């Protein structure tokens, strides 16, 4: 099994099957040698080696460089555009509860981009897998569009849906899955809840703890919720979002991030007080 998307490097045997992954960003190439039986076409043996891509030793491919260079020049004015500043590095790394400084800011940006109008959102959720880098403070703290794009490179559309309070609770419970690491969604300002890892799957969110601006959300209450289109289609196994109604599509996630930076700079790390883990 040749796997990917995990951003991990491994070369192992699981249940008698070779399983490999070549890390991330082209740092490794996996070389796999198979011995086949020409009569039965069965695989007799399989061996793999993860080989480091030595960019310090081997020259860049000239044809590839010739292809990339003009596009880099075309993108340079946009990439170098000043979008705002930070007072300190905005970290994507989550705490024990699953909350992160950068995740909170991105969720706030997505809420701000979709809150206007009678059908505007009151809550936004975003997935940690859509946040690829920290926003680092360098020198004076200036941030360019290239740094925002490196953080959110997928160009996902924002989608605002109607969900009931019961569906929002189900969404939160879907963060935990049997035999898999949890995927804790980042939440926008004003939305809070608590969870307990000792409670059974499907019941880890503490009853009565799901609140918006300090007010408990009733199961029958209907709320407008923004997510990206990956999540809206049930991505990362958040299947309840596919049942959302009255969908309204908005701007790309990185456009919302850009607009938020320009309106609110300088940005600073805020408190991690939206998700509480009891145990």
Image (tube, grey):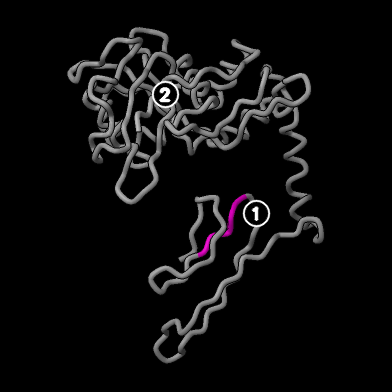
The correct choice, above or below, for 196 with respect to 223 in the image is below
User: Please, what secondary structure does the residue beneath circle 2 have?
Assistant: strand
Query: In front here: 246 or 260?
Result: 260
Image label count: 2
Residue 62 showing in the rendered view? no
Seen at 53% across and 60% down, the residue is: 21
Q: Residue at x 77, y 41 (%)?
A: 70
Depth check: give the residue in front, 28 or 248.
28
Image quarter hosting the C terminus? top left
Q: Is residue 218 left or right of residue 43?
A: left
Q: Position of residue 132 (x, y in %)?
A: 57, 37
The secondary structure that dominates the magenta segment is strand
Quarter holding residue 194:
top left
Q: In the rendering, at what x and y percent does residue 98 appear?
A: 44, 32
User: Who's the residue at 45% across and 34% down the image?
Assistant: 96
Q: Furthest-bottom residue in view?
A: 39
Residue 91 percent coordinates (x, y)? 59, 29
Q: Do the residues bearing badges 2 and 1 touch, measured as CB atoms within 8 Å?
A: no
Q: Residue at x 40, y 27 (%)?
A: 227
Answer above or below: position of 230 versus 113: below
State the residue position of label 2: 187
Where residue 260 sits in the image (x, y, percent)? 56, 16
Cα distance, mark 2 to mark 1? 32 Å
- How dense is the environment of label 1, judged by Cα within 10 Å: few (below 14), some, or many (20 and up)? few
Q: Is residue 91 above or below residue 23?
A: above
Image side of residue 172 versus residue 219, left or right: right
Label 2 crowd bin: few (<14), some (14–19), many (20+), radius 10 Å? many
The answer to whether one can see residue 127 in this image is yes
Q: Which mark is residue 110?
A: none
Give residue 26's mark.
1
Q: Which residues are magenta?
A: 20-24
């Amino acid at each position: 099994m040749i796997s990917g998307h995990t951003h991990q490097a491994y070369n192992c045997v699981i249940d008698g099957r070779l399983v490999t992954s070549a890390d991330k960003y082209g740092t490794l190439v996996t070389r796999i040698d198979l011995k086949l039986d020409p009569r039965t076409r069965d695989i007799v043996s399989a061996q793999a080696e993860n080989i480091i891509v030595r960019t310090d030793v081997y020259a860049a491919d000239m044809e590839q460089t010739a292809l990339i260079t003009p596009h880099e020049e075309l993108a340079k004015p946009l990439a170098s555009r000043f979008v705002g500043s930070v007072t300190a590095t905005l970290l994507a790394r989550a705490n024990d509860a699953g909350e992160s400084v950068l995740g909170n800011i991105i969720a706030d940006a997505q809420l701000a981009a979709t809150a206007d109008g009678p059908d505007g959102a009151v809550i936004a959720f975003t997935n940690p897998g859509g946040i690829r880098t920290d926003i680092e403070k360098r020198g004076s703290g200036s941030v360019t569009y290239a740094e925002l794009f490196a953080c959110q490179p997928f160009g996902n559309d924002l989608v605002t849906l109607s969900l009931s309070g019961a569906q929002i609770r189900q969404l939160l419970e879907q963060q935990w899955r049997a035999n898999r690491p949890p995927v804790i969604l980042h939440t926008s300002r004003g939305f809070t809840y608590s969870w307990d890892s000792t409670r059974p799957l499907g019941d880890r969110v503490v009853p009565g703890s799901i609140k918006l601006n300090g007010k408990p959300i009733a199961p029958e209450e209907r709320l407008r919720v923004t997510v990206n289109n990956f999540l809206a289609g049930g991505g990362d196994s958040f299947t309840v979002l596919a049942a959302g109604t009255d969908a309204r599509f908005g701007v790309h996630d990185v456009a919302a991030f850009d607009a938020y930076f320009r309106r609110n700079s300088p940005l600073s790390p805020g408190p991690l007080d939206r998700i509480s883990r009891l145990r």
